[in-house]
Structure formats: structure tokens, C-alpha cells
Image: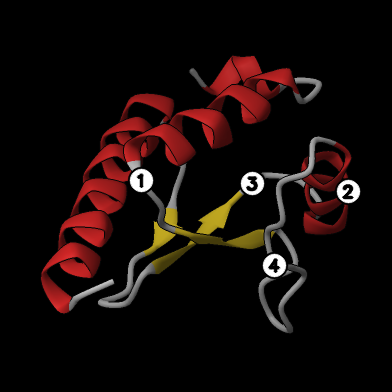
Amino acid sequence: MNARAIGKRTFCGRFCSSRRRKLSMLRSVDSLTNFVMLNTGRRSQEVVEHFAGHRILVAGPVAGYDKYIRVSLGTAVEMREFWRVWDLMPGGHMHT
């Protein structure tokens, strides 16, 4: 994958994710990389396990950020799947 394709993928993931976070009123720690730290409003280990059960890997917990998960930004299709699984989480739909 060339630099242009990587840049386009990261931009798409960041745009789709940013728009959804704003609509969901979720807070995050933005970065200039290909991931964001998303405040889940609950213990991050619960969220990590939920996503793992749906074959999506997210990172957490992170020291000092016990309610945050690290979400790598992907393609629009990948980010839609992330939010679909988020909505399956008990109480997840309340953020949308």
C-alpha cells in the first residue's frame, strides 16, 4: 500500500469516526496518528471483551485511562462495522 492510499484510508476513518463520535456525544483523545482514544463511559475491559466476541480487536485498558479504548482508524466499511458492534453492546445504542 502506498503513502497516498494510507493517507486516504486514515482520513476516511478519521472523518467517519469523528462524525459518529460527535453524533454519539462520546469523548475522545484525538491524535495525529491512525488511532483515537475513545472514552467508553464504562470499564474498558468490558468493551474490549465485547468487541473480541465479535472478532474486532481494540486495545485497552491503558494505564490512567481506565474507561478508554484505543481504536485504530480503518476504511469506511471497517468503521461502520465498529459502530455496528458498538450498538450491539448493552447500552451502546444509548450513545447514538
Secondary structure under tag 4 reads loop
The CA span between labels 1 and 3 is 21 Å
Q: Please tell me whether mark 2 sits on a helix, a strand or a loop.
A: helix
* Residue where numbered disc 3 is placed: 40
Q: Which mark is residue 59?
A: 4
Of all residues, the one furthest to the left in this rendering is: 4
First along the sequence among labels 4 and 2: 2
Between marks 2 and 1, how big is the CA–CA gap? 22 Å
Badge 3: how crowded within 10 Å, few (<14), some, or many (20+)?
Answer: some
Q: What colouring does the structure picture have?
A: secondary structure
Task: Tell me the SS state at disc 1.
Answer: loop
1 or 4: tag closer to the N-terminus: 4
Please state the horizontal and vertical placement of residue 63, each as a whole percent of the image: 74, 84
- Left or right of 34? Residue 59 is right
Q: In percent of the image, x 56 and y 36: which residue is there?
A: 82
x and y, in percent, of residue 49 in the image: 88, 48
Of labels 4 and 3, earlier in sequence is: 3
Left or right placement of residue 93 versus residue 66 in this view: left
Asked if the residue at tag 2 contacts the one at tag 4, i.e. Cβ–Cβ closer than 8 Å, the answer is no
Q: Residues within 10 Å of mark 4 (few under 14, many from 20)?
A: some
The answer to which of 50 and 12 lies nearer the viewer is 12
Amino acid type for the residue under numbered disc 1:
Thr
Whole-percent x, y for residue 27 in the image? 44, 49
Q: Could you tell whether 29 is left or right of 43 in the image?
A: left
Return the residue nearer the eye: 92 or 17: 17
Q: CA distance from mark 2 to mark 3?
A: 13 Å
Question: Gap in Å between the C-alphas at discs 4 and 3?
Answer: 12 Å
How far apart marks 1 and 4 lie (CA) works out to 18 Å
Sort mark 1 into few (<14), some (14-19) or many (20+) by Cα contacts within 10 Å.
Answer: some
Of the residues tagged 2 and 3, which is closer to the observer?
A: 2
Label whose residue precedes the other's in the sequence (2 or 3): 3
Q: Which residue is mark 2?
A: 49
